Image: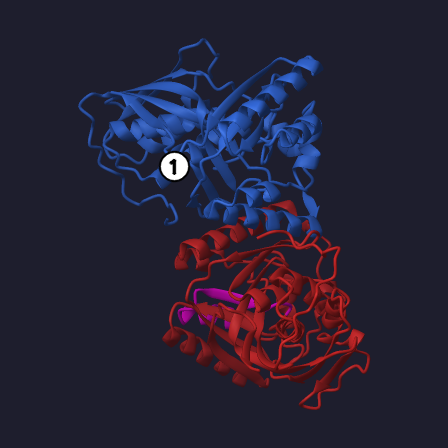
Chain colours: A red, B blue
Amino acid sequence: MDIAQPSNENKKPNYSAAGYVKVLAPGTVANLVCGFDILGMCLNEPNDLMEVKLLKEKKVIIHSADGYPLPSDPAQNTAGAPLIEMINELDSPTGFEVTIHKRIKPGSGIGSSAASAAGAVVAANHLVGNVFSNKDLVRFAMFGEKVASGVKHADNVAPCIFGGITLIRSIHPLDIISIPSPDLFVTIVHPQIEVRTKDARQILRKEVLLKDAIRQWGNIAGLVAAFMQNDLDLIGRSLEDVIIEPVRSILIPGFDEVKMKCKEAGALGGGISGSGPSLFMLSRDEATAKKVQTVMQEIYNQIGLEYHTYVTTINKTGVKIIAE
Amino acid sequence: MDIAQPSNENKKPNYSAAGYVKVLAPGTVANLVCGFDILGMCLNEPNDLMEVKLLKEKKVIIHSADGYPLPSDPAQNTAGAPLIEMINELDSPTGFEVTIHKRIKPGSGIGSSAASAAGAVVAANHLVGNVFSNKDLVRFAMFGEKVASGVKHADNVAPCIFGGITLIRSIHPLDIISIPSPDLFVTIVHPQIEVRTKDARQILRKEVLLKDAIRQWGNIAGLVAAFMQNDLDLIGRSLEDVIIEPVRSILIPGFDEVKMKCKEAGALGGGISGSGPSLFMLSRDEATAKKVQTVMQEIYNQIGLEYHTYVTTINKTGVKIIAE
């Protein structure tokens, strides 16, 4: 895959006749334990439903279908900011009217803002005749992440757009590599506490021990090799984070117990999804993934925290067009 | 590949009738730029020639064929220490008499101590009927590295024993993964200055910036993915070290010029081999690898430093038995 760079020439849109498209924008798990800021994985559940209408003027309008309060300025909205970038690279006055059915709870740590950003750009690109590459779409969608968390990161928007597991080798310049992903089951628990991405970033130390960094990059290399060789035991051994997890897990009640008991129940491994509070676990089959779900439910029932759980699989295609 | 652990029961040797074996123990490039302490690559040139004779008593004798001064105590020798570990895990009194023809210059940074250690254990294992696994041999050979540099590391001995490119995900417990390696050409230059591994380790900072660590593990993940997908451009982009190279390269005259001019000559990339002073460059074909060699020669001629160069390929089989 080449490095994505903005083009010097604006693209000529090739408008869709329908002028309307409906997409499913999936949740994503960033970091994958040892791959802080560089790895992400796309999920089949949960996902947002988004409807996008083509406008023939340079304008972006965002509606919430469910009454979530949205910033009135589209530049301050996670779906709006990427679309503003996109229409600035089109040579005819073009705009989009977006209606978001938000089903991935904001602040859950499973890529809610990324789904809005990625869903919007994939839908909009469809309406202008797919003149932009997936790499361009990631570049646009990162502006949504900047609105959401103050940082332009791609470890949710890239897997949401490409599907499967993606490696962001570098942000400047943007370099995205699709990693073949095995057929694993994913169990997610979202304990209903608030962990803001900004806060989860601020508690990290700016310096780390070299010996910990070495252990971490051994695990990342092991995890990438394991995905590519479909070596499930090696996936389990490599899902270890000695740098971020020890700091961030303190923000998540029940973390240690969930991790220990889910592995006892047969999960290969797992940890914090993105910056939390959701936790994810990978399993080799559905029966194990459901056992893991029961373990999660028991733990949060006992703690007395509200939660949602999902049992799902790796989504290998990313944002999906379901109607036009 | 499983994790190597010492067995509780000693092995019964199945002695070779010949009682003698001759092996080629190849040089290796540790770190591979961004994979400090976790990646290593085996070379077809240069290599040590080693002769090993079976003894029926618990004894290790080491001879140098070329007059290199050797410690009289085998426990203090890089070939001897691993053999002492091995014979302690055999259930009959067994020993080895080793003659080393040292052709990989000690202190060159291309795995001279590892070749002695790995060559000795592969040859000895052959003489006792290959009762030990390659993982066991790495475990033994690391005792040689400890004698040589004070640290038990496997990023030279593992590729020397397994061949190809190996990932050491973890040392405790030992976890080695073979990475499929593309058919690349390797150019090595060994400028004749002394860089002791111990010193090269001591100048490293104990803490690194998190942002640098993230950049490094993006590159490592990219390099592993690139090797496995045979993506030569991605290999080139991933051969970047923002942590170790900026510190260690100061010890090596001509480093920046070699790196820049070799890439201009068509090399995919490269850097310090192990802890130096040798430098290596990867190229997609032999013509480029030879052009890179000329560039290296010109630079060190101009600096006025003695040097050796090699143009070679990746050795995919490791230590090789050539006679018995």
**Percent position (x, y) of residue B40?**
49, 37
x, y percentage for residue A133?
Answer: 62, 62
In the foreground, A298 or A50 = A50
Q: Quadrant of residue A286?
A: bottom left
Residue appearing at x 31%, y 36% in the figure = B89
Q: Determine the residue located farthest toward the left in the rendered image.
A: B17
Q: Quadrant of the C terminus of chain B?
A: top left
The residue under label 1 is B162
Q: Is residue A46 visible?
A: yes
Q: Is residue A233 left or right of residue A302?
A: left
A123 part of magenta stretch: no
Q: How many marks?
A: 1
Answer yes or no: is residue B146 visible. no
Q: Residues within 10 Å of mark 1 (few under 14, many from 20)?
A: many
Residue B68, position in %: x, y?
A: 48, 12
Q: Between A255 and A25, which is closer to the camera in this rendering?
A: A25
Residues in magenta, as a range? A258-275
- The residue under the point 50% across, 79% down is A310
Kind of element beneath mark 1 = helix
The residue lying toward the viewer, choosing from B298 and A126, is: A126
Res B96 quadrant in image:
top left
Q: The residue under label 1 is which amino acid type?
A: Phe
